[in-house]
Image (spheres, helix red, strand yellow):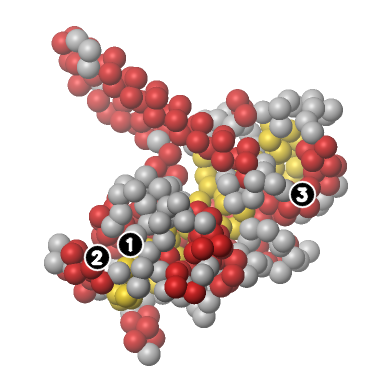
C-alpha cells in the first residue's frame, strides 16, 4: 500500500541499486538528483543497506524525501558469480530487490551499474524472457558519424546460435524504431569481412536466416572498422565479440581524448590556443564520449532493466534514467512482444 500511495504521484518509478558501480552510491544519488530536476514525473525507489542510508540521507535529504527507500540486507560484489547471487541469502540484496520490484509492475524500471552476470540472472529468473525469445541480450547505442548505432549483444551471451542472433536482430530493430520512429532501420551482422564467403559457420548460417526474414531490413555484413561510419542502424554479434568491440572502442575513445589533452597543455602557446578553442574540444569530447550513451538495456526480458557502465558518473547515470523513461513512454516491451510473435 505504501508503494500504491507513493505511485499515485507519478507514472515512472525507477528502482536504483545504490551499491552498483565503481563510484556508487554518490554517482547514483547525484544522477538521480540531476534526472529528477529535468523531469518532475520521476520518482525513485532506492535500494541499499541501512548503513548507506544512514551515511547519505543527510547530504541527499531532499532526494530521500521524494523517494521510497527499501532496506536490503546486503549487496552484490562485482566479482560474485551469478549462481551465488541467486542463493537464498543474496535474494535480499539491493540489486535483487531493485529487479524483483518489476515482477508486479511493468511500468517500473530497474537500473544498476553493478555485476552484469548477477543482473542478468535476477532479470531472467524474476521477470522471465519474453515469449518466443530464448535468450536476452544487452543492447546499447554507440556513437557513430551518421547516427547512433544500436549494438547487441554486448556481453550477456558469449556463445550464441544463429537463431539467437536472428532474435537479437528483430529485438534490436524494434528497439531502434522505438527510439527513432522516423528511421527505416537497417540491420547488419558483424563479420571479419564484407564478402559473402567470409566468416565462420555461425556467421554463414545466421546470414542465410537473416536474408530470408521479413521482420528485419537486413543489409549483410559489416566490419568492425565501419561501426563508427555506417549507414546501418543495428549491428548484431555474439556477446563475446560484442563486449570486446565495446571495450576496445571505450579504450580508444579515452586514449584519444587524454592524448589530445596532454598535447594541448604541453606549452604556453598550445594552452592559449586550447582556451580559444575550448568549446570545440568539448563538442568533440562529447561526440565520442561513451558516457553520453550510457545504459545497456537487457532486451528480451519481460521488464525494463538497464545496466549502467561500472564506471558511470552522475552525468552518465542521469542519462541511463532518462533512457529508461523513454523505453516506458514508448511502450517498448509491448512492441518487442508484437514483433517477435510475428
> What is the quadrant of residue 98 in the picture?
bottom left
The location of residue 14, given as percent across then percent down, is 39, 68
Instruction: Kindly identify the residue that appears in the image at 16 percent across and 11 percent down.
Output: 268
Instruction: Kindly identify the residue that appears in the image at 53 percent across and 68 percent down.
Output: 86
Q: Nearer the viewer, residue 49 or 235?
A: 49
Instruction: Kindly identify the residue that appears in the image at 40 percent across and 23 percent down.
Output: 256
The numbered mark at residue 52 is: 2
Mark 3, Cα crowd under 10 Å, few <14 / some 14-19 / many 20+, is few
Circle 2/circle 3 CB separation < 8 Å: no
Which mark's residue is nearer the viewer, 1 or 2?
A: 2
Where disc 2 sits, the SS reads helix
* CA distance separating discs 1 and 3: 35 Å
Instruction: Kindly identify the residue that appears in the image at 44 percent across and 30 percent down.
Output: 251
Where disc 1 sits, the SS reads loop
Q: Earlier in the sequence, mark 1 or mark 2?
A: 1
Q: Nearer the viewer, residue 78 or 171?
A: 78
Q: Earlier in the sequence, mark 2 or mark 3?
A: 2
Q: Is residue 262 visible?
A: yes
Pointer 3 residue: 161
Circle 1/circle 2 CB separation < 8 Å: yes
The location of residue 221, given as percent across then percent down, is 73, 33
Q: Earlier in the sequence, mark 1 or mark 3?
A: 1
Q: Residue furthest left?
A: 58
The location of residue 183, given as percent across then percent down, is 61, 47
The numbered mark at residue 18 is: 1
Amino acid at each position: 500500500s505504501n508503494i500504491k500511495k507513493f505511485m499515485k504521484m507519478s507514472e515512472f518509478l525507477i528502482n536504483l541499486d545504490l551499491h552498483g558501480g565503481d563510484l556508487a552510491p554518490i554517482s547514483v544519488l547525484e544522477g538521480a538528483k540531476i534526472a529528477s530536476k529535468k523531469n518532475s514525473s520521476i520518482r525513485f525507489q532506492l535500494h541499499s543497506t541501512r548503513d548507506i542510508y544512514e551515511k547519505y540521507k543527510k547530504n541527499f535529504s531532499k532526494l530521500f524525501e521524494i523517494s521510497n527507500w527499501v532496506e536490503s540486507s546486503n549487496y552484490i560484489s562485482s566479482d560474485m558469480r551469478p549462481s551465488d547471487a541467486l542463493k537464498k541469502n543474496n535474494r535480499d540484496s539491493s540489486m535483487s530487490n531493485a529487479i524483483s520490484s518489476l515482477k508486479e509492475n511493468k511500468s517500473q524500471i530497474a537500473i544498476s551499474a553493478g555485476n552484469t552476470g548477477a543482473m542478468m540472472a535476477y532479470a531472467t529468473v524474476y521477470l522471465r524472457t519474453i515469449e518466443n525469445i530464448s535468450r536476452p541480450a544487452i543492447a546499447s547505442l554507440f556513437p557513430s558519424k551518421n547516427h547512433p548505432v544500436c549494438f547487441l549483444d554486448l556481453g550477456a551471451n558469449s556463445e550464441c546460435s544463429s537463431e539467437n542472433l536472428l532474435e537479437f536482430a528483430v529485438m534490436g530493430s524494434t528497439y531502434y524504431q522505438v527510439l527513432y520512429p522516423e528511421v527505416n532501420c537497417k540491420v547488419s551482422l558483424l563479420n571479419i569481412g564484407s564478402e559473402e564467403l567470409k566468416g565462420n559457420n555461425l556467421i554463414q548460417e545466421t546470414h542465410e536466416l537473416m536474408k530470408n526474414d521479413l521482420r528485419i531490413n537486413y543489409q549483410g555484413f559489416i566490419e568492425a572498422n565501419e561501426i563508427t561510419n555506417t549507414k546501418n542502424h543495428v549491428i548484431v554479434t555474439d556477446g563475446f565479440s560484442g563486449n570486446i568491440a565495446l571495450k576496445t572502442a571505450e579504450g580508444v575513445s579515452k586514449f584519444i581524448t587524454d592524448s589530445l589533452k596532454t598535447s594541448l597543455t604541453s606549452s604556453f602557446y598550445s594552452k592559449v590556443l586550447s582556451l580559444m578553442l575550448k568549446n570545440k574540444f568539448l563538442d568533440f569530447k562529447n561526440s565520442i564520449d561513451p558516457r553520453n550513451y550510457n545504459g545497456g538495456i537487457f532486451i528480451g526480458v519481460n521488464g525494463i532493466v538497464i545496466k549502467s557502465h561500472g564506471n558511470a558518473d552522475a552525468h552518465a547515470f542521469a542519462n541511463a534514467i532518462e533512457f529508461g523513461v523513454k523505453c516506458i513512454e514508448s511502450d517498448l516491451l509491448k512492441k518487442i512482444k508484437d514483433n517477435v510473435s510475428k
